[in-house]
Image (cartoon, grey):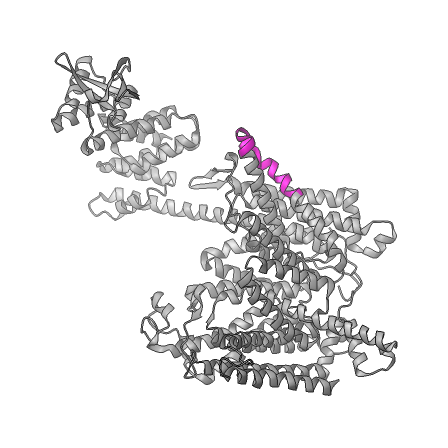
Amino acid sequence: MRRLLLVLFIAWLAAPAAGQAAPLSAAEAERALLDLAGEDGDRREAAVKALGGTADPKWLEFLAAFRDGNVFSRVKAGKTEVLVGGAKSTQGDQEVIELKAPYDGSARGSAPLASLKEVAADRRLRVVIKPFLDADETRTQLADPDPGVRRSAAVKLGNQAQPSSAAVIQDALGKESDGWVRHALAEALALVQLASGDAAVRAEAARTLGNLHSTTAMPALRALAADAAAPAAARAVAARAVGQIERWSMLTATVETLFQGASLASILLLMALGLAIVFGLMGVINMAHGELMALGAYATFVVQNWFRAAWPGAFDYYFLVALPVSFVVAGAVGVVLERGVIRRLYGRPLETLLLTWGASLIIQQALRLWFGAANVDVSSPRWLSGGVPVMVNLTLPYNRVFIIGLATAAVAVMYWVLFRTGAGLRIRAVTQNRAMSSCLGVRAGWVDATTFAVGAGLAGVAGCALTQIGNVGPSLGQNYIVDSFMVVVTGGVGKLAGTILAAAGIGGLNKGIEPALGAVFAKVAILVAVILFLQRRPAGLFATRGRNAEA
Amino acid sequence: MRRRELVVVGVVGLLLVVVLPVCNTLPAGSSLYVPDFTLNLFGKFLAYAILALGLDLLWGYAGVLSLGHGVFFGLGAYAMGMHLMLEIGSKSVYQSALPDFMVWNQVKTLPLFWRPFYSDAFTLAAVVLVPAVFALAFGYLAFRSRIRGVYFSIITQALALSAWLVFNRNEMNLGGTNGLADFKTIFGYPLNLAATQRGLYVVTAAVLVLAYLGCRWITRSRAGKVLVAIRDSETRVLFSGYSPARFKLFVFVVSAVLAGVAGALYVPQVGIITPAKIGVLPSIEMVVWVAAGGRGTLVGAVAGAVGVNWMQSWLTTSYPDLWLLFLGGLFMGVVLFFPDGIAGAIKNGAGRLQILTRRAPLAATPTGDARSRDLSRTAHPRPEPASRTPLQ
């Protein structure tokens, strides 16, 4: 903290006066305006600098109008007058424009456009104007109520590393209370100082940047460490800072990989959960599971369009409606599938596999014919875009966090249903022994239908969640389905814990080896790993132990 | 029965191997003339039929459903394709000794694994051996640990997906997404000549007949009986002192070799091989040929492969949108209504007709015919639902 204060003090000493506002007297302003209307390039440039240097929002507004070609001059009673144009209208065959005075904006009547001379800003002047307007924009952004806007403005200032912005940054730093924005501001300030000429200031800035783990500063710090002209002490400080930042990025990379693994595992779990329950209960591998997911995704798309058309104000909440809708849509199709065809084929898993594959082709092609072969656009609600910053240089996207939460919730609900409700009791009974359960009065067919509906509904929810992180198209299901089969096969039937562990293992392993092997060979490696794993446990993690030799 | 089958095979074989190509050489005006295009199309179907025979042996007889046979088809096809690529030599677009796609990908020297494919003999050996060795390794791991039923199907499907992903990669030096194409000659014969294509067709048809006889020989042997026994109850076979894993591995390798040979015959006739032929969807389409034709009957596999592909080439040109709907419907319809496919349905119908006309039960005389009918009846037993441990 003391070091930071010291830095700030030095920065205050070093701060150039350029950013400070210099008010203009009425006479000076008048002269600047007349210069602007004149022909002399140098005097015009000086006038722009004088006006921009005031940092007065009203003058900046005038400069913006000037840049946009909306400033006019006219000679009235031998005196040149500079005016800002307003709304244009047509009267007869003349175009008439409303006029306002510069600065105070008081109305000055209107005049035919033909009687006015445009005061045009050439390229040279526009270049001079831009920094003034930009500085004003960042200043506004730094005062924005949204911390995210303030933070990105600070990051922008740091990237530009203009010496002139030091004062603005310090000003903002004094008022800022949000920790992340303060961090970004301090980083921006140090970056500005690192670009300055004074060796002592640079060394101090390098030390600060090291402490702040600034990856943005890496190229500049490396350059300083290798700069033969710089003092040895400053180079050493820079080298140490580089090491510090490198260690930190390794840490963030590790945390990020873990998070991505958890996120992939959650997606796999959401998909595999429905598959595993149905497989455990009926021995049916549902090849149409991926298409049920696609149905959920398209249901989300339709709900989104309803909201956009009917309640644009409540658009951000469409996703909360889409979640249950996609569950119901996919679940309903699942029931039709189960009651219609699958129930005729119990005890013949290979046939059901082919049957559901056929169903999947039909659903996929139907979606393609109905919605078109191209991907459709599902936009994220505002509360799912952006991310939560957890560490320096590490922001976790909200949509991924949401999916992890959704998967956790789905598992919790499934556990509760299976082990705390009567319906769950019946499901477990039929899973264990279908014939005996039927004898004891459990309606096995009804249990099958509801379980299949729940499994299909979970697929729909998974599809709804996938709209937030990937493309929505007719072949959406195909991209993930083989992976979720692998999860089910690795997890084994009969226990949810197997599915959860397998999803975590496959998701984590995949993301863990992806940086080294690339996405494709990581997938191949996963397949090899699963085959080798099945050498040890042919029926998955938690094999069923029954006395039936065929099991 | 056996004699009758031999006669039928002889007649159909003669028709395919001799009569069709001869009709192709007739003048174009003749009423019996078979156009080059049709003959070529038939050559493709017959290549598929070779693959279907192997798949039927594996699934229909041994009860092992592989959803990854596209991979073995692809291995044979790519082995042949690599040789054909090298035969192009510097007659290619870029006039480099390297295949064109290597020129695009800035590969300067021929990768080491391509070199042996300059040799004709090595290529012919590779067409058989590469799928065989790969199937041996994969099957060994799978069957040794008693991965079976749905588990095996899922694993092979993952294999198809992985192979598809890998063959799509440019750094594998196998042409990436575009695959291998633009072949000019095969063993020195120009591929654009009708005579060469006719020759390829004759070879394909002859190989099909040989493959049929070979498969029939296997199913008639003691090993074939064990295979059927494994399908009906693997555990009982195990308890009887046989090792089901070895039999399954054997039939898996045989079917992989047939798939590889089919791929090698497919490539010169179609002129291109891409990863799209070895993915998940083509692999499962192969299964539906067998299912539609009738598994457990070798004739059914051949009929299914030719029939479904004929249907496909007609539908995809006339009604492209409907093809996938039709394929899905075929899957469901066959599984629900014709579990024994066309062959089973015809046999069933014929049996009923016989009963109606003779008014006597066919099974009265214990002939070979009746025995095989019994077999097909137990082809798809409904096992008792296995008892399981509780969910925990």
Assess whether residue A319 is covered by the magenta stretch: yes
Quadrant of residue B182 within the rendered picture: bottom left
Q: Nearer the viewer, residue A497 or A90?
A: A90
Query: Can residue B239 be seen by looking at this rendering?
Result: no
Quadrant of residue B360 within the rendered picture: bottom right
Residue B82 percent across, percent down from the top left: 44, 75
- Our reading of the magenta stretch's main secondary structure is helix
* Residue, far top: A77
Residue B97 percent across, percent down from the top left: 33, 76
Q: Nearer the viewer, residue A21 or B5?
A: B5
Screen quadrant of the N terminus of chain A: top left
- In this view, B180 is above or below A213: below
Stretch of the chain drawn in magenta: A309-328
Please report the residue visible at 62 percent of the width from the left and 84 percent of the height from the top: B13
- In this view, A269 is above or below A37: below
Quadrant of residue A488 within the rendered picture: bottom right
